[in-house]
Amino acid sequence: MGMGNFLLVPEADFNLLGRDLMVELGIGLEVRQGELGIKIFKLTLEDEQEINPEVWYTPETVGKLDISPFTVTLKDPDKPIRLKQYPMSLEGRRGLKPEVERLVSQGLLESCMSPFNTPILPVKKPNGTYRLVHDLREINKRTVSRFPVVANPYTLLSKLGPENMWYSVIDLKDAFWACPLDESCRDYFAFEWEDPDTGRKQQLRWTVLPQGFTESPNLFGQALEQILQDFVPAPGLTLIQYVDDLLIAGQTEEQVRKESIKLLNFLGLKGLKVSKSKLQFTEEKVKYLGHYIEKGEKMIDPERVQGILSLPTPGSKKQVRQLLGLLGYCRLWIENYSSKVKFLYAKLTASNRVIWEPKDEEQLQVIRKDLATAPVLSLPDLKRPFYLFMNIDNGTVYGVLTQEWAGKKKPIGYLSKLLDPVSRGWPTCLQAIVGCALMVEEARKITFNSTLKILSPHNVRNVLNQKAEKWISDARLLKYEGILLEAPNLTLETTSLQNPAQFLFGEPTQTEHLAHDCLQTIEEQTKIRPDLEEEELTDGEVMFVDGSSRVVEGKRKSGYAVVSGKTLEVLESGPLNPTWSAQACELYAILQALKRLEGKSGTIYTDSKYAYGDAETGCMLCKDMLSNIFQNPEAAEVAEAKEAPATRQDMRRVLPLIPETELYKKKGLKQKSAAVGGTVKTPPLSPSAALPHRYACCNQ
């Protein structure tokens, strides 16, 4: 078939002369990166005849919603933001003039005399025309924002389900401009405009929600959500909205076609405009929110991946934040994402400029490789059970969420979270409790309340029931029990598998070497010496220790005391640094008692649960944690400036030198003591005060 000459108009929806022929063939031409390509349209002439033509966007038309005008609240509105217009080239002003005149003629801009003024920028588009960009950053800083209720793209696609095989994606054109702005707020959005031909200057202001305003997506999203409540999809069809992007999904092509036409007519009736060139009408593969969706699966947009791979090495904190933002959008596809990007967050927290080292480049290449080989993820089926494998590694919990299809595990997403600083100091098997709770909370964003089975190499249930109380505060313990033990539709199981690859693909593992007893492992990890027990010794020295920190006559004082349990003699006491907490003082008192017991046997009594637990179980664990802290020069300087005690390090040194030691905790040790001139003096004791449960060493 000969087609003859044609005329290319990049900004038009159809780029061939002879529109009827093009519609008949179902094709169109489009320019991508300077190259001419063919686009096949699913929208037929018969379909268009069923659609209200008012819904289609043209440069001469603009959408308008019949809603109450939005108001905007600024902090200190009586102090106008007055920024001069940036220097603009004559070419830029001439390029903007047609756009400004169009916006004025359509009522989107109007003349004004406002005390506010913010600059505009001309941005040249690939087709040679210009876009007006309003720099509203200063307005955004002063805006009192409403609570955002925009849908979470992280979990939005969970509503689709893998049974839906046909999709339509509708992109609303200039949607924010369809929302009127209250006249009392319009002066906030004024800018200066100079006509390139006459040189006349004037101020213009927006009468609608401007693009670039921080509140525009939230306000429009809520308005559209209210409007869509009047649109009820047919049974078996799903409608998803994210700001101004709509998606319809269904099981058959005809169902989706009819529902798409119905929705387009509804939008046109409400006063919204749709970009026909961006319409994805009844297709098996569509692009939505930066992902490709096809046959119940989703994959990262290759253009997004290529954009990340082509980014230069970050040289500033701004570039590091930009890289983290792009990577974060793809975190579901990256195994153990949180651990792999820790080095990037470390660049942000450093006080000096970003220094990119060879090891940083190696870690970044690992992430780039993960992106380049990112797997295809299945869309979740909320009617089927979910399986989540999780493990702990280097202060990070990571795992993979799956569902079974035809006997095979299909990944729904890779999940990972950093543990909080407190739990990172616990034994690995105890960290699994926190990690498991975090994974459940993350998975519920995707699974909602569907059946979920957690598989881990750690026996989380036994550890939580038998060992957690010694380490975890009551508030934390109650939280974790509520999440892991009392939640409906949740099962905890132990597995010998160690990583997501083994879980997904059944890779062989040496079970006999990798399986472990969590309770025994915790005992081994937390014992600084095997003979440290909780029972009293029948012989040897007996000592009572105490330490405290409190405010006396407006000044904070800290102190400690070590008292002989046999003679009731104060062996030593004294003031400590006022900046030390009561817990640090308690630890220091135990340390001094341990030093006195060097080479001897003895029992030490303390009324501090914190110090007792720290000496009994924490010394071995804090070795690596403290060494990491003090390997950081900045952290060491801070610690030195605050005169932080090295109590735990000394306890690790002293405790193994004592032949037999018992740490014994007694509650309710209350005997007042007095502080005079910064020293501790204990009042005379009654005979009953010698009993362990009646004695207290000091209150400094």
Image: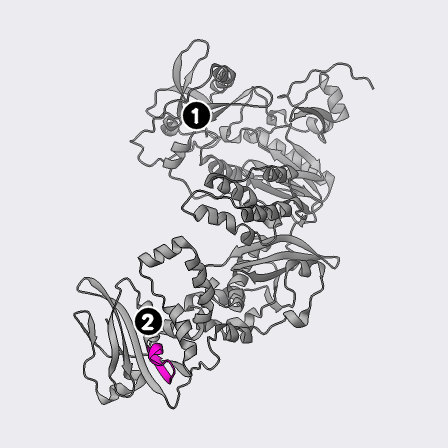
Choose between 270 and 128: the one closer to the eye: 128
Residue 31 - label: none
- Would residue 579 appear left or right of 256 to someone viewing this image? left
Q: Is residue 595 on the magenta stretch? A: yes
Tag 1's secondary structure? loop
Identify the residue position indicated by label 1 in the image.
207
Q: How far apart are marks 2 and 1 (CA)?
A: 68 Å
Q: Relative to 324, is 273 above or below?
A: above
Choose between 656 and 497: the one closer to the eye: 656
Over which residues does the magenta segment extend? 593-606
Q: Residue 146, can we see it?
A: yes
Q: Relative to 365, is 223 above or below?
A: above
Image quarter (top left, top right, bottom left or bottom right) of the N terminus: top right
Q: What residue type is labelled 1?
A: Thr
Identify the residue position indicated by label 2 in the image.
588
Check the image and name the residue furthest to the right: 1
Q: How far across and down, in percent of the image, does residue 404 sit? A: 70, 58
Q: Relative to 205, is 579 above or below?
A: below
Q: How far across and down, in percent of the image, does residue 178 sit? A: 50, 29
Mark 2 Cα within 10 Å, few/some/many (few <14, many 20+)? many
Q: Which amino acid does label 2 sit on?
A: Tyr
Q: Residue 155, can we see it?
A: no
Image quarter (top left, top right, bottom left or bottom right) of the C terminus: bottom left
Q: Quadrant of residue 460?
A: bottom right
Of badges 2 and 1, nearer the viewer stands 2
Q: Is residue 136 on the magenta stretch? A: no
Q: Specify which label sits upstream in the sequence, 2 or 1.
A: 1
Q: Quadrant of residue 514?
A: bottom right
Query: Which residue is found at the position 46% from the left and 41% from the top?
Result: 317
Check the image and name the residue furthest to the top: 198
